[in-house]
Amino acid sequence: MSESPAAPLTTADGVPLKVSLRRTVRRSKIKALLLVAPLLAFLFIAFLMPLFEMLWRSVDNPEVSTHLSRTVSALEGWNGESLPDEAAFAALAEDLREGQQERNLGLLSSRLNYEKSGMRSTISRTARRVGTLEPPYRESLIAVNDTWGELDTWKLIQREASPYTMSYYLAAVDLQLSPDGDIVQVPEYMQIHATLFWRTLWMSAVITGLTLLLGFPVAFLLASLPARHSNLLMILVLLPFWTSLLVRTTTWIAILQSQGVLNDIMVFLGVVADEARWQMIHNKMGTIIAMTHILLPFMILPLYSVMKTIPPSYMRAARSLGGKPFLSFRRVYFPLTIPGIAAGGILVFILSIGYYITPALVGGQSGRFITNYIAYHMQTSLNWGLAAAISSILLFVVIICYLVFNRLIGVDKVKLG
Amino acid sequence: MAIPSYATRGERIWHTIFLGICGLVFLFLIGPLLVIIPLSFNAEPYFTFSKAMVTFDPAGYSLRWYQDFFTSSAWLNAIKNSFIIGIASTLLATVLGTVAALGLSSRYMPARGVIMALLISPMIVPLIISAAAMFFFFSKVNLAQTYVGVILAHTALGIPFVVITVTATLSSFDTTLIRAAHSLGANPTRTFFKVVLPLVTPGVVSGALFAFITSFDEVVVVLFIAGPEQRTMPIQMWSGIREQISPTILAVATMLVLLSMLLLTTLEFLRRRGERLRGLSPG
């Protein structure tokens, strides 16, 4: 391979080899990218844009600035030490009058109600009577509803005039802004989200631990059996894996409920009295049992694929060198399975903290996850900003776990079935 | 697992205990699915075995819940919707995913790690988050409560499965086979159809099956973005479990278990075929 500087290697048509090679590589790169491009574009529109929209919604705060635009500009420069002047009250009356005519005060009153309870009725009551009010508005508005005479109300309007807000994120962890702008805890009876975040995390950890405990021996057995036996047993792992999630949850309802199969058997055997049937469902236990069952294959499969690569001769070597069975296992075999434990553990944990269906059906009150509150705020309380903020926090946790997973194992190593 | 001849007595006992534990775990895995099948033939409207069932009295068994399913317009409509949405999103996901996998398996693919992580993300992001996000976005662009919206959403959820399976198949694809075909005189078209396609098809089909089952089993996204017209099987089951609990659900569940057995057999068949074609096993 001697390359003289005077006559560099060229291809048949006289282009230097280096240039030609670079051109080919570039063309291959572009070709590969073009093949991936349609899918990337699709996912961008159908998946990433929605996620961005959600993140944006968790800080978006348009209600006050659009529906109370006059009031907001009248409050500019107000120092917040005493009630604002007549101009601000007149602007508020005008804003409410317009809102009442166009019937679009609903969003505004809900928004302010999240921050200060009672604002919903204050606004609707005032708006209904604002048509008949006479100046001076300061006196007449306070006469309609004395909330307008409170300094905090005006501070709230001034604060929420900003087009972005952190208050959904604060609410998602049971915090709120006090009228003076300090971050404080919400009253104890309203604290729910932080508890649910913690419960989701610790119950997911318990479920991960249980799947590891149950999955490890099975994966070990599958990996050490000859292929024709292990393939048969593998079906017992893969069949539940392939069965509809709802079916598996339904079976646990049929088995665990107080008039269900397991209780009937226990009563029949005389282990439990008929009137003292076990309450195994619609509580934490129901969620843990059903989710351990559902997620167990996700632990067994990665463990199995790692254990399959450990040569059985290692254990024999350890034994022949004088290791007692347990010591050989702990010092030789177990360390080699750690990549599988990490893969399965992170996978089960990620899936578990995001589960919604199973906790909703078998979890009752005490076995609910934070995901159930996302659904609650989406569908029942219609506080979409809060739902978006909780989702964003959960998404953040999941992404962290995913990055760790990707770093440790590599996402392209994921195998299915 | 053969126990070595040098095993001590303690080890033999321990080995038996170990097998017992494994047996219990297998029972835990498969038991619930076995319980539900006989329950679906219950003549009584309960979720538990009646006296007549335990004593194998034929009067305790009946097909009424199956009849209930096949005569209910709500269930039949739901199954129709599930197939429409499932098939459409599977086709879309398979085409997009396979083409992308071809690019991803190229040696020259830039930023493969990042792109792969991105393509897999719909599988990792919790469904409830995807559902909420898609609800916000799709209602903004008037896709909520339409078939198109649900199909697009399910396509996004099915894509990772196609990408993973097809990339795995392509990575074990021996490219010298293409050169061999050329050197033996086949033109590129013939090479593609006679050599590449038969080797890659099992992977593509398993990817498609994964995508289909993902859509067919998906509740949360449909719950959020579908309207009453797009009620699918899982939604029908979901509301059945929550509202009027009837053993019709168990009949549906039994049929779904049979469906998953069918899918599993197909997949296993494809896997063996793939291995045989690639000469990995003598089969």
Image (tube, coloured by chain):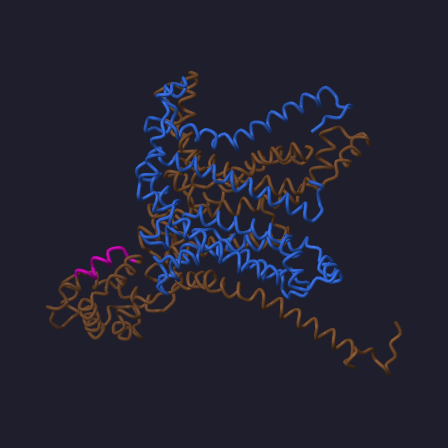
Above or below — where is A43 with respect to B276?
A: below
Q: Which chain is brown?
A: A
Q: Residue at x 85, y 82 (%)?
A: A7
Residue A245 shows in the view: yes
Give left or right: position of A308 versus B227: right
Q: Where's residue A202, x and y in %?
A: 49, 42
In this rendering, would A313 be left or right of B126? right
Any part of residue A169 in sight = no
Residue B17, above or below A62: above
**What residue do we see at 30% from left, 75% from top?**
A76
Quarter holding residue B107? bottom right
Q: Nearer the viewer, residue A228 or A175?
A: A228
* Quadrant in which the N terminus of chain A appears: bottom right
Q: Position of residue A68 (x, y in %)?
A: 26, 70
For the image shown, how many numbered marks are present on the structure? 0
Q: Which chain is blue?
A: B
> Does the magenta portion include A119?
yes
User: Residue B35 or B147: which is nearer the viewer?
Assistant: B147
- Relative to the observer, which residue lies in front, A339 or B196? B196
- Return the x and y of residue B240 as percentages of the image width and height: 34, 40
Q: Is residue A207 above or below residue B202?
A: above
Q: Position of residue B272 (x, y in %)?
A: 64, 43
State the extent of the magenta-drawn residues as a range: A116-125
